[in-house]
Image: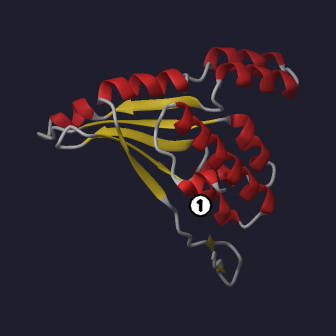
């Protein structure tokens, strides 16, 4: 349950909430799974969308372009391979972090509170532990978006739960039951 506190003058809102993080063991090598993930979740076509903005196209054109860019509902907006930097400190594990999302899903929540962009796109990471085991980690979208206590935003978070479940299923990754039953 979300409990909201507000300062007496109404200038600061504090909303504590619980977030569920899934860390899923992957039955594949780090390199292979990373390649599969990046194939299933293509990079955001920034030049294409910048041109659509420049042209001032209608939203339907954005929806169509997004569907073409995101065959499994998600796009990579940013990524960083932390491995080379962390190796300078002597760490042996590998990790790549991503911001993965879909601006057309985010838009359905944004209209009710632009602050949803704090959680959109979603943060994901692929990492390899000291034993060479590959893992995928992500927070359950509905647990973050539900903190806004707005039914339309909560619905968007649940939509992302189901899209994430479908992506994991497509990639042959075990799907947490909480994502399937959202």
Quarter containing the C terminus? bottom right
20 is higher (above) or lower (below) than 162: below
Looking at the image, residue 7 lies above or below residue 169: below
With 110 as the anchor, is 137 left or right in this view?
A: left
Residue at the far left: name it. Answer: 90
Judged from this view, the residue extending furthest toward the bottom is 8
The colour scheme of the drawn protein is secondary structure
Q: How many marks?
A: 1
Q: Residue 76, percent across and down?
A: 54, 29
Is 170 on the left-hand or right-hand side of 149? left
**Residue tagged by mark 1?**
143
- The image quarter containing residue 57 is top right
* Residue drawn at point x = 69 percent, y = 53 percent: 158
Which residue occupies 15% across, 35% down? 88
The residue under the point 67% across, 54% down is 115
In the rendered structure, the answer to whether residue 127 lies left or right of residue 43 reads: left
């Amino acid at each position: 349950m979300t409990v909201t506190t507000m300062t007496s003058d109404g200038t600061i809102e504090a909303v504590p909430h619980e977030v569920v993080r899934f860390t899923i063991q992957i039955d594949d090598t780090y390199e292979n799974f990373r390649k599969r993930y990046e194939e299933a979740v293509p990079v955001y076509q920034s030049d294409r969308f910048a041109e659509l903005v420049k042209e001032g196209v209608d939203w339907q054109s954005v929806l169509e372009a997004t569907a073409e860019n995101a065959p499994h509902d998600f796009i990579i907006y940013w990524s960083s391979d932390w491995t080379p930097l962390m190796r300078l400190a002597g760490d042996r594990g590998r990790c790549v972090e991503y911001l993965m999302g879909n601006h057309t899903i985010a838009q359905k929540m944004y209209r009710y509170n632009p602050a949803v962009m704090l959680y959109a796109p979603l943060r994901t990471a692929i990492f390899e532990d000291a034993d060479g085991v590959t893992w995928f980690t992500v927070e359950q979208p509905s647990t973050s978006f539900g903190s806004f206590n707005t039914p339309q935003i909560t619905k968007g978070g649940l939509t992302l739960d189901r899209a994430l479940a479908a992506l994991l299923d497509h990639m042959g990754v075990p799907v947490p039951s909480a994502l399937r039953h959202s």
